[in-house]
Each structure stands twice: as C-alpha cells, then as structure tokens.
Amino acid sequence: MIQPPDYVLDIQPYIPGKPLEELERELGISNSVKLASNENPVGPSPAALRAVQGAFADIHRYPDGAGYYLKQALAKKLGVAEDALILGNGSNELLDIAVRTFMKQGDDAVMAAPSFVVYAMAVRSVGGRPIQVPLKDFTHDLGAMADAITPATKMVFIANPNNPTGTINTREEFDRLMARVTEEMLVVVDEAYYEYVTDGSYADSMKHLCAGKNLLILRTFSKIYGLAGLRIGYGIGRKEVLNDMNRIREPFNTNTIAQRAALAALADDGHVSRSLEVNEKGRQYLYRELGGMGFSYVPTHANFIYMPVDDAPMLYSALLKKGVIIRPMGPKAIRVTIGLPEENFRFIDALKETKGIK
C-alpha cells in the first residue's frame, strides 16, 4: 500500500464541525446559534447577492484566471499596482501556496502559539519545521519570535489580529521585528480581521511592503464581507514574490461566482459600516455580561472573544446541549463569535444557566 512521507503522517488533520442540521438532529434541539467560526452574522452585502444571481448564467465557462476586474478594483482601493495582488481560494490557499513556493524539507518557519492552526500544518506538509513561540499576554511576542529565527528560517507567520485571541501587534513592535528579518525569508502577515481594527497603534504592514521588504499580506472576503462560503481572499506582495507563487497557483483557483460577489462586496462601504456597528454593540454587551458573571476574557480587536475557562470541553458540551455552538480552544479556553443581538443574548442566557445564575 502506498504511504506518504513521515512528515505528512505527523500532521493532525483539521477536524471540521458537523453540519448544523446534523447536530440538531443528534441532540434533539432546534434553532441553534452558531458562534464558532467567526463568520459575519449580518451576512453578505445585498449587492453581492445580486452579483451571485447574475453570475449563474456564466457558470458553464471557466472563470477569469487572472481575476482582472477584482484585481483592478482592489488595486484602486488599496493604492497598489495590479501586479502586487494575487487571488486565492480563501487567504488559506495563499498561505499554503507561499509555503510550497518558498520552503522545502528541513527549513524552519517561525510562528506564535496559539495562533491559526493552518500555519503549522502547511509547513509540516512540505517537511518543514514549525518553530512555535508562546504568546505573551495573549499577544504575539515579536521579540521572542525574532530571537527564534535561525539560519534555516525561510518564513515568519504573524496573525494580526491573532486568531484565536483577538489581540494585535503595534506599529513599534512590528517595526522592530522587520528590522531583524533578512532578505532570505518571507514574512507572512495574516490580516483576515483587518477591517475590524480601529486601534491607531495597529501595525502598518503596507509601509514595509512599499519599502521593498519581503512581505506577503493576506486578507479575505470571508470575514467582514460575509462571503465565507464562497472562499475568496487575496494577497498583497512584491511582484517578484507573487510571480514565484504564480508558478504554483492553479490556473482557475477562484471561481466566477466568488469573484463577482467579492467585486460587489468591495464597493459596498455601507455594508461594512453596518457590520462594524453590529460587532461593536455586541462586543460591549458581551464585555458587560461576561464581567458581571465573573468570567475573564481577552479584549478583542476582531469579531470574536477569547475566554480562559476552567474546563473548556465541559462548557462546550453544556452550551451545545442548549443550542449554542462555540469553539473550544484546548482544555482551558473557548472562543465565541460576536453575533447578532439575539444570538449574543442566547449565548449569555445559556452561560448563566450553566453557572446556575438567574
């Protein structure tokens, strides 16, 4: 029987959650609230939905492999050249392409822990070694990450804001890290939750890219734009870096419906504003309620809240039985998406019931 290399066998597969309908059937519940995957509870822009409907007639044709119109709109919005952009089947695909382009067996990649689990999975898939540096105060310790760089380091991954903790790295911290990386490595800055950040001290990754640094900045339409089910994201980088990644990228990696929906969503600033307003009101409500119940939480710059707890599996199970789905993050923490007002109420009510609070 054919066998993969040992470094592939060492990877723990990502375990997806069951469909909501199946969970409800198994547990004998209905009207569940899903607060596990950091989706935008407002949903997609109405303009994006119209664009999806308008694209149906063309699905017998292959998509635009270059993403011409979407890249044109992104370039105008971001103030970059079109050849500084690459589209992906979610930003997830782009980080995988970057690893396969620039890493080989025996190379190192530095990243934080806990952070987005796919970084380590992608690195291991090519026989690389993930060097995982513990968070400090729930935040990337960029100084320690710089100290962890070795001659074998080819990539550095930074999630800003971080998933699962929702914390950010500041401009000064990021500047110090960038002063220590070499031209022989690529810094991947995952900004999936970029649009949610309002803190003026937030790191300016574009500044370093414009200065010619080897950066790949990843953003997505899955979060604030509400297009998670269509899987489309983009990367911003130096032309030379993206040219090499395009050697690996599949010719038609983003589909027609996703491209057109993203193009329409990008132009709908009102939808983004509404989503930010819902998120901010929900965040302040959850802060008040969680604090009042004695729960600790990490202040967030994204659309989810990380909560240290005594027994995450137990709490997850208890909430699930009450029709509230959150994400356990190991044995001692959970992550909950900030939902619509009624979804947040359901979560708090269920949490009170598990603690016996009336």
Image: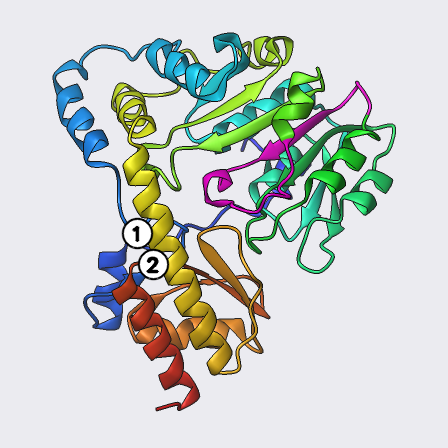
Q: Amino acid at mark 1?
A: Pro
321 left or right of 251 in image: left
Range of residues picked out in magenta: 182-204
Task: From the image, tell me which residue sits under label 2.
Answer: 339
Q: Secondary structure at mark 2?
A: loop
Q: CA distance from mark 1 to mark 2?
A: 5 Å
Contact flag, marks 1 and 2 (Cβ < 8 Å): yes
190 left or right of 63 in image: right
Sooner in the amino-acid sequence: mark 1 or mark 2: 1
Q: Look at the picture and state if 266 lies above or below 271.
A: above
Q: Look at the picture and state if 27 lies above or below 199.
A: below
Task: From the image, tell me which residue sits under label 1.
Answer: 41
Q: Look at the picture and state if 316 lies above or below 223.
A: below
Residue 160: which disc? Answer: none
- The residue drawn where x is 43% and y is 71% is 316
- The residue drawn where x is 69% and y is 47% is 112
Q: Residue 349's spot in the image, x, y percent?
A: 33, 78
Q: Quadrant of the N terminus?
A: top right
Quick one: 323 or 214, which is closer to the camera? Answer: 214
Residue 226 in view here = no
Quick one: 271 or 163, which is closer to the camera? Answer: 271
Residue 357 counted in the magenta span = no
Residue 240 in view here = yes
